[in-house]
Amino acid sequence: MLSIALWISLTFIVLALAMNVFRLAIGPDIPDRLLAVDTMYVNAIALIVIIGLWLNTKTYFEAAILIAMLGFISTMAICRYLLRGDIIE
Amino acid sequence: MNLSFMIEALISVLLVLGGFFAFTGSLGMLMFKDFFMRLHGPTKGTTLGIGCVLIASMVYFTLYQQEPHFQELLITLFLFITAPVTGHILAKTGLHMHLKYITGTQGLQPELKDEDVGQSRVARPARPKRPGDIKARRKQLLKSRGR
């Protein structure tokens, strides 16, 4: 049962990542692409956690924490650059 | 119906729900019509989905494998704190860049009653007294300095 649930969840998340890539390609403005990247890193964390469940290891959670922090900081930095023209004033 | 079967069923339900909500958030981001509508999907649906997946992982390692493991709670907390901040600053960026949006999504204007718009007057606080003539004040100041 667990392996079937893992397959279903992996399928959903890979489809979500594909839709994010599509929005990243066609997004008409910069904030749309930024939103696509923001959603993409959240989905990447879900993918890493599910792979950790699949392989039954705890090694990948540090990678998940790192991706969470770096994704948030990069989104904030690009938003600050678009808003103020500068990152750190 | 032993305990391990129940735990396995709980983990499976959480995993499928998490995947489904992440899929729904990305579908909303792909299919909505303008940027401010697109912002709704990832900030709510994807956050709920990733919370479900992380809780499923925590339950798996803690109860199914009998090894306590609570780092997922840290990621969940971090994502639940940062998702509203990101949505807010993305909406601010969209407003700042004057992106196109669809009119007609605002709903009806609220009807204002008399007491809301200030039909009945409220007494103002009294104004502070004006200081005296400025030449008299200057003269007094010079006198106090002894000139």
Image (spheres, rainbow, N blue to C red):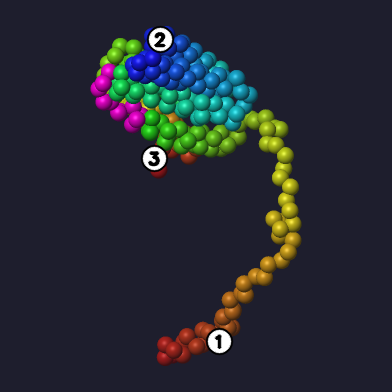
Closer to the chain start, of discs 3 and 2, is: 2
Is residue B66 one of those drawn in magenta? Answer: yes
Q: Which-is-in-front pick, marks 3 and 1?
A: 3
Is residue B133 one of those drawn in magenta? Answer: no
- Distance in Å between CA atoms under marks 2 and 1: 94 Å
Number of numbered discs visible in the structure rendering: 3
Q: In the structure shown, which secondary structural element does the residue marked by tag 3 occupy? A: loop
Q: Chain of mark 1?
A: B
Q: Nearer the viewer, residue A89 or B142?
A: A89
* Residue at image mark 2: A1
Q: Which-is-in-front pick, marks 2 and 1?
A: 2
* Residue at image mark 3: A88
Residue B71 point in image, percent of width and height:
30, 28
**Which amino acid type is shown beneath numbered disc 1?**
Ala
- Residue B49 appears in the figure: yes
What label does residue B136 carry, if any? 1
Residue drawn at point x = 65 percent, y = 30 percent: B101
